[in-house]
Amino acid sequence: MKKRLFLHAATALLALAASASTLAASLSVSSGSLADNQPIALTFIGSDASCGNGQNIAPQVSWANVPAGTRSVAVLLFDPDGAKGLGVTHWVAYNIDPARGQLRQGEAATGVEGVTVGNNSSGAAAYKGLCPPAGDHPHHYVLTVIATDLPPGTLPAGLGRDELLARLKGHGLAGQSVVGTYGH
């Protein structure tokens, strides 16, 4: 009986250790531009007065611990509160070599070597500064990195968020997000 109890305890400890090592090695995403549940600086806000007179600069985002088999990553910046709850896509970037480890602040706003910039909600292949209506409750801006098994360069230019997500079905290996807020 003691032997059986010991075996169950040992098995449980091994399972716990295995799950802890899996968690430690899972995809992590961070940003020097957006902090979870914190207000977003004017640097990343649209430059129009109706947005808050920001600088319209694409945020920095980093990723680490991509899963085995990751061949590219995609980066999305989405406002689920925008367009009266229908959502607004601010940034779509994909075909990115995971070894790059990050997109620096201002990089890939309209394209850079090794990054395909897709279409925002306005239909432009560019970063679109954050711009909730004045007086609205602060909007939530979800900056997501998705690890995929697709080699860089596989996906065509010109994809919007919905088209990209449709093409990633069956190819996504992991995803993580950072969520910042902005209102004025």
Image: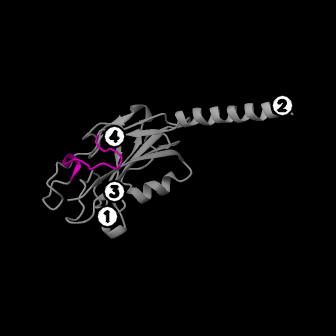
Indicate the amino acid at tag 4. Answer: Ser
Q: Earlier in the sequence, mark 2 or mark 4?
A: 2
Which secondary structure lies at badge 3? Answer: strand
- As drawn, is 131 to the left or to the right of 73? left
Q: In 3D space, how far apart are the residues under numbered discs 2 and 1 (Cα atoms)?
A: 60 Å
Tell me where the magenta segment starts and ends, as one range. Answer: 33-45
Circle 2 or circle 3, nearest the eye: 2
**Residue labelled with disc 2:** 2
Circle 2 or circle 1, nearest the eye: 2
Work out which residue is located at the far bottom of the displayed protein and give it.
84
Q: Label 3 near label 1: C-beta < 8 Å?
A: no
Residue 21 screen position, x and y as percent: 58, 32
Residue 174 screen position, x and y as percent: 51, 44
What's the mark number on residue 140? 3
Residue 84 screen position, x and y as percent: 32, 70
- As drawn, is 8 to the left or to the right of 184? right
What's the mark number on residue 82? 1
Indicate the amino acid at tag 2. Answer: Lys
Q: Is residue 150 magenta?
A: no
Q: Tell me which residue sits at (43%, 31%) in the image.
A: 99
**Residue labelled with disc 4:** 31
Which secondary structure lies at badge 2? Answer: helix
Q: Is residue 119 visible?
A: no
Q: Badge 1: how crowded within 10 Å, few (<14), some, or many (20+)?
A: some
Q: Earlier in the sequence, mark 2 or mark 1?
A: 2
Q: Badge 3: how crowded within 10 Å, few (<14), some, or many (20+)?
A: many
